[in-house]
Amino acid sequence: MKLWRKASGALKDQRSVWIANIARRKSFRNPEIETAIIKATNHDELFIDTENIAFIYRTLRLSCDHHKAVLFAITKRMTKTRSWVVALKGLILMHGMFACEVPSIQKIGRLPFDLSNFRDGHSNPGKTRPHNKFIRSYYAFLDEKSTFLYNDVVDYGNNTGYISKDDTIQASNNNNNDNVDSSMKQECKVIKKLQRLLDLLLVIKPQTKATIGHPLFIEAINCVIVEVFDVYSQICGGISRFLRRICSVEKGEAEMALKMTQKATKQGEELSLYFEVCREIGVLHPSDCPRIETIAKEDLKDLEDIINEDRFEEMTLNEDHHNNDTSKEITMRDHHQVASINEENEYSKQRKMMMTIVTHKWETFDEGLSTKENDKEKNHFEPLISL
């Protein structure tokens, strides 16, 4: 039966290539590109055509004009297929296209095809159910990532580079301090979206023996792991930058920062479990990933107490004043009298101490993950992503 499916798949690929070659060349249709897409997403589950994958990536990097033909070909291929092999290869290929950082690909918005309800139509449903689930999870992440790139990556300086909107706003704040609040709110939104991406990534994992040892799923997991390192590193860096400025923000924004930190801590625990699964199935070597440290619950509780303190607003407004003149009394809030200046100074020191504890932890995460992410990219994104 396997031999018959393999022969049938090869015939389908040959027929598709023949049709592509006789098709009329148009602005959105290029027979050479379409043929390469078909061969890169062939039906052979034990063979990955790295040569044609490399050709597609090179074509995209050479000219943005080719992106329409590439998207047309991959959309046509993914829309028609009922094979989990073709679907998974198409998703891996799409993932690599995003990694090429071609502006026109990063601006497509939602993916031009839909695999959210994908079901393999050529094999026993009982055997391919885990495959279908994996593909649907992978598609959900890539669709969300494509939307994120469209909404939160903007042109920067006459096509000289591409940078997230929060960084663009932050850069403009160097010349305009009045926009600090806007910058921090935007950074919060971006961090939340990154945390959403990480949630979707952690769902993508093989769950049965049929998928655990399969080379195609291992290749997909390698791509996902690199993405996990990258996204989690960005989350840690964003939270670290935010917490360094927490003393200058309003209470609502500080509470938002606390929620983000709590979620990131929870995600760190889930990440440790995810890496453990990857190590068990042989995808990840123990030395390949950093030790995921989490913020101590006691530190989070102290930060929560500080943020929820009734005097938060007074401390924010008068903190600099206290450092210069410890003899001047702090403004009363509502009708509560502050006990003493020494007590308030101690409270201020406690807040700064919490800032040091939390931001140091996240900076450590960011540095460690960035280094490992680069190592993983060198080791595992060849040949599919870095070609």
Image: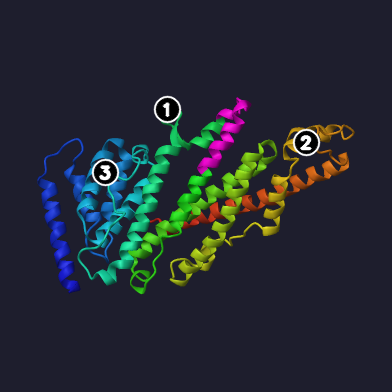
C-alpha span from label 3 to label 2 = 55 Å
Mark 3 or mark 2: name the one nearer the start of the chain. 3
Quarter that holds the N terminus: bottom left
The residue that disc 1 covers is 158
> How far across and down, in percent of the image, does residue 187 sit?
55, 39
Q: In this image, 335 relative to 281: left or right?
A: right
Query: Can residue 35 be seen in this snapshot?
Result: yes
Asked if 330 appears above or below 241 in the picture, the reply is: above
Element type at marker 2? Answer: helix
Residue type at mark 1: give it: Asn
> How far across and down, in percent of the image, does residue 133 sit?
34, 62
Residue 319 circle label = 2
| The residue stretch that appears in magenta | 172-190
Q: Main secondary structure of the magenta part?
A: helix
Residue 71 circle label = 3
Q: Residue at x 66, y 42 (%)?
A: 244
> How far across and down, in percent of the image, does residue 281 sit?
43, 71
Element type at marker 1? Answer: loop
Seen as rendered, the residue at the extreme front is: 335
Asked if 14 appears above or below 163 in the picture, the reply is: below
> How far across and down, in percent of the image, does residue 112 sit?
28, 44
Element type at marker 3? Answer: helix
Q: Residue at x 59, y 56 (%)?
A: 265
Q: In this image, 92 relative to 271: left or right?
A: left
Residue type at mark 3: give it: Leu
Closer to us: mark 1 or mark 2? Answer: 2
* Res 257 → quadrant: top right
177 magenta-colored: yes
Residue type at mark 2: give it: Glu
Q: Nearer the viewer, residue 129 or 173?
A: 129
